[in-house]
């Protein structure tokens, strides 16, 4: 799947939004990618997940891990494409962890998937979880990478598309200075 095809899917479902947004990281942006709008359509979830799976098909993957919320649907569908199991990490008392009886066996090869990587914080927390179970991170993927180059983690990172979108520190945000209403579309 080409980057143009992915971008067209995102545009078709109005997943690329413009305004004044509070990102999970605490930063502000004039653009927001709401991948939930894409993943609500099984055919698009399947297409994006298949493209992610193809990037890692030559690697032995035992489990696909995604951080809640954005990585839940994606981890399931990527795991289905790879013929393996899917789990997700979620926050409890502000700490990302495996719950619901999920675990990673020592030595298992784990692919971490996320819908959008901005700062890499949730991915870094998932990497820590994998290491705490003595699993091996085989790689990381996302539909969108809007984060820093290089990412703040050392694992192989293969996003489907890189978008350079503006981010602003809240104290230096031109949108705040213009009085544009701040929206918080994310899950935290």
Image (cartoon, rainbow, N blue to C red):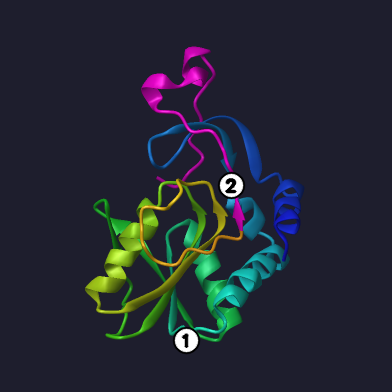
Instruction: Say left or right for 162 vs 90.
Output: right
Q: Residue 50's mark?
A: none
Q: Residue 186: within the magenta?
A: yes
Name the residue rendered at 55%, 86% in the picture: 83
Name the residue rendered at 30%, 85% in the picture: 105
Q: Is residue 78 above or below residue 128?
A: below
Q: Residue 164: within the magenta?
A: yes
Work out whether residue 181 can be spotted.
Answer: yes
| Extreme residue toward the front, this view | 150
Q: Secondary structure at mark 2?
A: loop
Work out whether residue 102 can be spotted.
Answer: no
Q: Nearer the viewer, mark 1 or mark 2?
A: 1
Image: magenta residue range: 161-188
* Residue at the disc numbered 2: 34
Q: Residues within 10 Å of mark 2 (few under 14, many from 20)?
A: some
Name the residue rendered at 48%, 62% in the picture: 71
Q: List x then y, in percent, for residue 144.
A: 57, 53
Q: Residue 60's mark?
A: 1
Q: Secondary structure at mark 1?
A: loop
| Extreme residue toward the top, this view | 178
């Amino acid at each position: 799947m080409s980057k143009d095809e992915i971008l067209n899917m995102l545009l078709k479902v109005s997943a690329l939004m413009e305004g004044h947004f509070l990102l999970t990281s605490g930063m502000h942006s004039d653009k927001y990618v709401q991948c939930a709008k894409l993943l609500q359509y099984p055919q698009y979830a399947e297409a994006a997940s298949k493209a992610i799976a193809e990037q890692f098909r030559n690697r032995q993957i035992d489990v696909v891990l995604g951080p809640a919320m954005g990585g839940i649907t994606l981890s399931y569908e990527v795991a289905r494409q790879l013929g393996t199991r899917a789990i997700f990490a979620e926050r409890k008392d502000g700490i990302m962890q495996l719950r619901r009886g999920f675990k990673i066996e020592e030595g298992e090869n784990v692919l971490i998937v996320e819908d959008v990587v901005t700062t890499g914080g949730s991915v870094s927390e998932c990497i820590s979880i994998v290491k705490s179970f003595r699993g091996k991170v085989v790689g990381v993927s996302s539909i969108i990478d809007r984060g820093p180059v290089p990412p703040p983690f050392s694992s192989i990172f293969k996003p489907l598309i890189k978008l350079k979108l503006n981010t602003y520190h809240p104290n230096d945000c031109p949108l705040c200075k213009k009085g544009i209403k701040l929206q918080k579309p994310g899950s935290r």
